[in-house]
Image (spheres, rainbow, N blue to C red):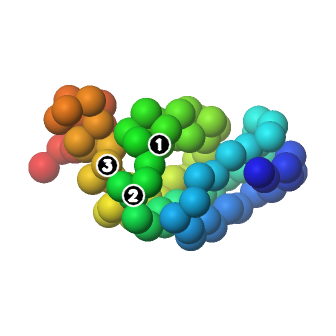
Amino acid sequence: MITAPNLVFLLFQSAHLLQFSTELHSLEKVDLRVYFTDLWSGSTIAGLLQQLHNVKFLTLNLELVEVLWNFKNGNCFIKIDK
C-alpha cells in the first residue's frame, strides 16, 4: 500500500496489485508497467485508473491496455482513434 500524499512521480513495475491509502492529489506523472496481467481483472484496473484521475500524464504498458480493451467481454471503454 502506498502512502505518500506529496508524491509527484510514480513508476510502478510489478505483477502485484497496487493500492493507495489516500488520494494522491499532487501526483502529476504515472508510469504503470504491469506484468502477468492475467492476475488482474479489468474492473480492478479500471478502479485503479479511477484513483489516478488527477494525473496529468499517464503511461500504460501494452499488457495493461490489452486487459482494459477486453474488459467486459470485449466492450471497450477506451476510445482509440486511428
Residue at image position (27%, 53%) is: 66
Mark 1–mark 2 Cα distance, whole angstroms, equals 10 Å
- From the top left corner, tell me how far across and down residue 26 is, in percent: 78, 46
Asked if the residue at tag 3 contacts the one at tag 2, i.e. Cβ–Cβ closer than 8 Å, the answer is yes
Snapshot quadrant of residue 12? bottom right
- From the top left corner, tell me how far across and down residue 43 is, in percent: 43, 33
Query: Which residue, given by chain and number where applicable, does mark 1 sit on?
Result: 45
> In the image shown, does 27 or 15 lie closer to the viewer?
15
Residue at image position (25%, 43%) is: 69
Furthest-front residue in this view: 39
Label 3 amino acid?
Val
- From the top left corner, tell me how far across and down residue 71 is, in percent: 29, 36
- Count numbered badges in the picture: 3
Does label 2 or label 3 sit earlier along the sequence? 2
Q: Dot 1: within a 10 Å radius of its alpha carbon, few (fewer than 14), some, or many (20 or more) residues?
A: some
SS category of the residue bearing label 2: helix
Query: Which residue, given by chain and number where applicable, does mark 2 sit on?
Result: 37
Query: Which residue, given by chain and number where applicable, does mark 3 sit on?
Result: 67
Label 1 amino acid?
Ile
Q: Is residue 63 visible?
A: yes
In this rendering, position of residue 74 left or right of residue 31? left
Label 2 amino acid?
Thr
- From the top left corner, tell me how far across and down residue 48 is, in percent: 56, 40
